[in-house]
Image (cartoon, rainbow, N blue to C red):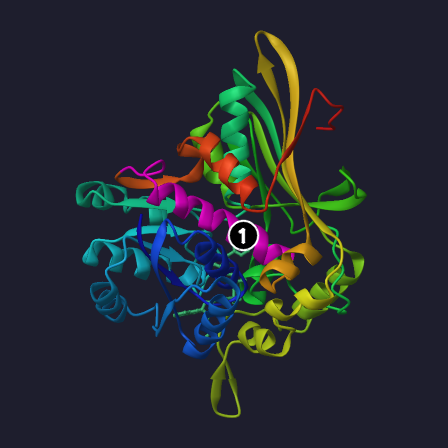
């Protein structure tokens, strides 16, 4: 039980704020801080109207450690939930150490000038968090996040050894726009256009971007063309579950989306380096973000479902076994509850869930941890109660 500070007032921050307010018996004081305070204030109004919960708001530049430390020392949060951008992970972790706050995020650190993400930068904080007696929970969205907990749950209850893991992420929703991304466009496009990678027999295998794809069948949705991508949870899962022989991540894309993406790349709009435009420095992908639809505004007309889960095979009691655990989430239901679309919802609900488990002492231990290193059972119970129930299929016919 204690004070929570949410940093970031985008799509995900909006959902976290709603969910934290819905659990204000545990989150006894709430502050929402971001670069643009007016966005925090708009969310504050909604929470007051909907739940009669009073939230404080603040302006902060999360790239600036001193500003963060001043804010943390003033509000004194027990836990800081970072749902700003991956660029801010390290500054927020530094400030947490300095001000004595615990930390949770949904995406691993990425430098602004290099489209490259890996956990090493954040894992390097382990000793400092441990010595300070503080907890840092990494990757507590849906993927990473729920998919990592699904894997931990499978390892705990269904397998002696996990051998094959396919994380499958389908967005079968339609927002009615020719092209839009479901979360921050800059982060999303950087992720998808980088080289693909999967784990096989003890090493990483690299492939050209989006060069491996096949239709996969999603529950209640049917077959959807799915593309092999590198996704950050693969890095921690193969480390934490060393019996895994192969781990891959698949995401669905429509042809229209891929055509736009190809054009964006071909005309240089996906560039992340600075260019000179009329005497002013601009980064093309940041300019593109400014003209694309805001992911937060997609919710109103979004129809259909997301379906994200883990398809696992391995050995239990000497026998081969398959296991599929997943959640289907309706964009329309997410919008009705929080005014955001399903991708923000499926990220924000798990972030609140991790924070809830921290506050109630179930996910609290000094150091820096990925979510699969905690007990999956209380997480799956709370995440289901909070809007993301899960289904399972045992020994179904899964393609690997
Ligand atoms: P948005 O772009 O909608 O929101 C980001 C928010 O962070 C904005 O309010 C923005 O401020 C704020 N922000 C950015 N830079 C700073 C800064 N320097 N100081 C203070 N605030 C800042 O992104 P999303 O809500 O879609 O995504 C949030 C996070 O969630 C991202 O890290 C993303 O990678 C992650 N994510 C994780 C997923 C998962 O399943 N694990 C899935 C989807 C997203 P402003 O309003 O001024 O722009």
Q: On the picture, is 145 further left or further right than 325?
A: left
Instruction: Tell me, yes or no, whether the highlighted magenta stretch contains residue 211.
Output: no
Residue located 66% across and 21% down the image: 322
Q: Residues within 10 Å of mark 1 (few under 14, many from 20)?
A: many
Report the residue that reaches farthest toward the front: 52
Report the residue that reaches farthest toward the bottom: 278
> Is 133 above or below relative to 32?
above
| Mark 1 residue's CB less than 8 Å from ligand 1 | yes
Instruction: Tell me, yes or no, whether the highlighted magenta stretch contains residue 348.
Output: yes
Q: On the picture, is 370 further left or further right than 284?
A: left
Towards the viewer: 87 or 270: 87
Q: On the picture, is 255 further left or further right than 39?
A: right
Residue located 25% across and 64% down the image: 75
Towards the viewer: 82 or 389: 389
Indicate the position of residue 31 as horizontal and vertical percent values. 35, 65
Q: Is residue 28 visible?
A: yes
Indicate the position of residue 216 as horizontal and vertical percent values. 76, 39
Indicate the position of residue 379 as horizontal and vertical percent values. 47, 37
Task: State the residue position of label 1.
Answer: 347
> Is 329 above or below relative to 56?
above
Q: Describe the element under mark 1 as helix, strand or loop.
A: helix
- Provide the residue span drawn in magenta: 342-365
Q: Is residue 194 visible?
A: no
Principal secondary structure, stretch drawn in magenta: helix
Towards the viewer: 189 or 73: 73
């Amino acid at each position: 039980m204690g004070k929570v500070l949410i940093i970031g007032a985008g799509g995900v921050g909006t959902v976290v704020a709603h969910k934290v307010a819905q659990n204000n018996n545990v989150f006894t004081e709430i502050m929402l801080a971001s670069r643009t305070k007016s966005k925090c204030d708009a969310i504050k109004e909604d929470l007051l109207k909907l739940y009669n919960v009073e939230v404080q708001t603040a302006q902060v530049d999360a790239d600036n450690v001193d500003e963060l430390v001043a804010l943390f020392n003033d509000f004194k949060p027990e836990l800081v939930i970072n749902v700003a951008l991956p660029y801010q992970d390290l500054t927020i972790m530094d400030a947490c150490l300095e001000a004595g706050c615990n930390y949770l995020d949904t995406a691993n650190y990425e430098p602004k000038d290099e489209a490259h993400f890996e956990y090493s930068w954040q894992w390097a904080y382990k000793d400092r968090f441990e010595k300070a007696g503080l907890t840092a929970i990494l990757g507590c969205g849906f993927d990473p996040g729920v998919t990592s907990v699904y894997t931990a749950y499978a390892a705990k209850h269904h397998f002696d050894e996990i051998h094959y893991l396919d994380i499958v992420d389908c967005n079968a929703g339609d927002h009615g726009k020719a092209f839009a991304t479901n979360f921050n466009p800059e982060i999303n496009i950087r992720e998808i256009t980088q080289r693909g990678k999967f784990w096989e027999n003890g090493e990483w295998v690299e492939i050209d971007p989006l060069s491996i794809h096949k239709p996969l069948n999603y529950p209640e949705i049917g077959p959807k063309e799915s593309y092999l991508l590198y996704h950050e949870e693969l890095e921690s899962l193969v480390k934490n579950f060393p019996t895994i022989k192969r781990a891959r991540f698949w995401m669905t894309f429509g042809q229209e989306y891929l055509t736009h993406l190809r054009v964006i790349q071909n005309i240089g709009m996906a560039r992340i380096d600075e260019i000179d435009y009329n005497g002013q420095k601009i980064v093309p992908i940041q300019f593109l973000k400014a003209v694309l639809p805001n992911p937060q505004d997609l919710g109103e007309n979004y129809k259909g479902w997301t379906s994200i889960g883990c398809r696992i095979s391995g050995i239990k009691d000497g026998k081969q076994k398959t296991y599929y655990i997943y959640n289907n989430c309706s964009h329309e239901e997410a919008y009705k509850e929080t005014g955001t679309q399903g991708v923000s919802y499926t990220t924000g609900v798990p972030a609140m869930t991790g924070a809830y488990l921290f506050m109630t002492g179930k996910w609290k231990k000094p150091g820096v941890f990925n979510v699969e290193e905690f007990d999956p059972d209380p997480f799956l119970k709370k995440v289901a109660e909070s809007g993301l129930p899960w289904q399972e299929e045992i020994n179904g016919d899964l393609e690997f």
